Structure formats: structure tokens, C-alpha cells
Image: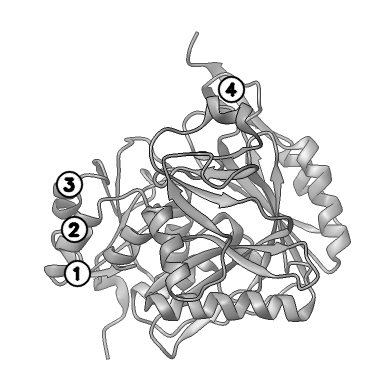
Amino acid sequence: MSNFFNKKRVGVLGGGQLGRMMIQAAVDLDVGLEILDGSRDAPCSKLSTRFVVGDIRIADTVEAFGEGLDILTIEIEDVSVEGMARLEKKGVRVVPKSKHVALIQDKGLQKQFFAERGIPTAPFVLSSDPSAMGFPVVQKLRRGGFDGRGVQVLHSKDDLQKCFPGECLLENKVAILKEVSVVIARRDHHDIKAFPPCEAVFDERANVALYMVAPAELEPLVAEKCLTITTKLVQELDYIGLLCVELFVVDNEEKSVLVNEIAPRCHNSGHHTIEANATSQFSQLLRVALDLPLGDVRPTRPAAATLNILGDHDTPKGSPTYRGIEAALADQDVTVYPHLYGKSSVSPFRKMGHVTVVGDCRGTVIAKVLQLRDSLGCRAAVDLNS
């Protein structure tokens, strides 16, 4: 039986908005979070117990930051797995394990793992020849792509001029009915909890999720397939931590479910859990890190949706100013919860915050999100380039 947790030193690699929301959850357990981030004015900089400026991708920096920590976790996967592994050898509890982050950092290794372990996924090849699978084909950078970057569809040979160089992941372009995500936590073989599937609607201009709706509108058997595949995946990985599994529901007679890719951290598709589930994804990750029993994941409201507040498409880079927040909070038919990320500058399509809308009727919640999509925004008050 351990003492409660204010004596535990918990570190986080990355100090962005996910770390910021993790800090808010940690306060409830009287846990202080120590943050390593490359930006002096990162969203966590003014809220953490200790804030260290340093490159999370450099092994020596990560190792030095982790000296004296009891626990280390991450809020982004672009980190030094070598540094994490060194701390594991020194007895730090690292969640997730360095070997899992290393696999997930490489989309090619992810797909090979899926194929080897019988996890359904779209047909693929790893090749430096973008025409190796014919057209149309989805080309993905093996490393570094996220939030719509590093992914493109090549429709024909005419698109070869824009293809990514070097060996990439090529996938058959499947007919997608829905894109859904399942956030799942695993503390050990017996303690596994998956949140109900959440459905994504994308901004086609930026290929970034515009809003998420929970629960996803799926036939019960399809929803069960999503949860079964996700649970099998974390068991096959022997994963410890919080994992977001992005899934395609295929537009075919069987409504097949395929794993697209995975993220070893809290995720945009789980933000609604702060207000709409008994335990949030951030609290759940902290429970795993602290080796506490996982929390109840059942929804506490019938419907929830999360709308990203993105930088305007035509904003210059500069100090952010938000619009539409006060009007959003005045609505009486649904409840709107704002989350502004405290970023020091805005640029086109950058995630600057989100609002979560909860209510008793899915249709009303979605209607409110669509209304807010047109009224909420963020642009530069002062142009940093001028």
C-alpha cells in the first residue's frame, strides 16, 4: 500500500495542450507534474510544478530531465525513445513503454505489427515507388506526420510530382463510411477500460478533425467490432498506458472495421470525456501511470461533441484573439464548456482550443456544434511578421 501521491514525482515529455489538461486532472489527485518542452512559452509553462526547457527528442536531455522522477509519461510521440529506455533501466516507471513508442513512431512498423498479429487493416506496402500499388493510393510518411500532415492521396500518375520522397507507407484507398476512434486504457492484463467509440468529422481543407461526436452513430454489432479489435490490439502489444485507436468503418455490406493508426497518448477524440464521462482520458492516463485501478468510462450524458477552435485560414502568425466564446456560453439548450490552450501565437488551422457541447439529444448537440463552427474562431491580434 503506497502513500498517496503528492510524494511521487511525475514527469511529462511535452508541454502542449494535452499536458495542460493532464495538469488539470492531476490537481484532483494532489499530484504535481514536471514538464519538459522545447518552447519557453508552451501551454504548460505557467502551470507545472517544474518546467524545463529542452528538446524532448534528444536522449541526453530526456535522461537528465528524468533524474529523480518516479514516473515518466508523454503527451506527444515525437520524443527520444532512447532517453525513455535509459530511464526505464534506472528504475523509472515509464508509461507507455519506450518499445511501444518506438513502434508507433514508425507507421510502417505499426502496419507490419497489425498484419503479423491479425489486426484488420487496409492492404499496404512499404516502398519508395509511389506507384507500387497503382492508383488511387494513400501515401503516408513513415515518421513525423500528424494532424493531417504527412498524408496525401495520389489519384493518378499526374500526382507523382507531389509525392513524398523516400520509402513511404502506401495503402489501398478504401471506401470509408465513417472514421471513428476508441480511446482505451490498459493497466495490466485484467484491468482494461475502453471508452465508447467516438465519430470524427474532418475539415477537408486542412485534413484535421473539425469536430467529434460521442457516442458514434454505429450499429451495435459494428460498435462491438470496434471495441473487440481495440482490446485485441492492446493485448497483442502487451501495452501499458492510454492508447487511441483510429478506425475506418468501411462502406461495404459487412461494414468491415479496419485499424488506420494508433497514438500512444491522450487524443483529440477523447476530449469530450472531461465533461461527458465518469472518468476523463486524462484522469485515466494518470491512473495507469500511478498504478491505480482504472475508472468508470460510462457516459454521464446522452450526447457530447467536441469542436476544435482552429486558427483562421487567412490569419497571419501573431498573438491570438478569440471570437464567439461569450455567445457560445449564453446558450441555454445545451451546455458548452470552453478549453483555450494558452498558446502564444496563432497560425492558419493551428489548434488553439476546443469547446465541448453536452446535452440530452444528439441532434441538438450536433446542431449547436454546426452553429459554433461558423461563429467561433481565432486570429492574430498582432501580426508577428509585420
Amino acid marked by disc 2: Gly
Alpha-carbon span between mark 4 and mark 2:
36 Å
Q: Which label sits in the foreground, 1 or 4? A: 1
Alpha-carbon span between mark 3 and mark 4:
33 Å
Instruction: Looking at the picture, tell me which residue is in the foreground, 334 or 256.
Output: 256
Label 2 belongs to which residue? 66
Label 4 belongs to which residue? 380
Residue drawn at x 78%, y 43% is: 372
| Mark 2–mark 3 CB contact (< 8 Å) | no
Residue density around tag 1, few if under 14, some if 14–19, many if 20 or more, within 10 Å: some
Residue density around tag 2, few if under 14, some if 14–19, many if 20 or more, within 10 Å: many
Q: Which label sits in the foreground, 4 or 2? A: 2
In what element is the residue under mark 4?
strand
| Mark 1–mark 2 CB contact (< 8 Å) | yes
Residue 293 occupies quadrant:
bottom left
Q: Is residue 110 left or right of residue 4?
A: right
* Mark 3 or 1, nearer chain start: 3
Picture coordinates of residue 43, whole percent (x, y): 43, 43
Numbered circle sitting on residue 61: 3
| Mark 4–mark 2 CB contact (< 8 Å) | no
Numbered circle sitting on residue 92: 1
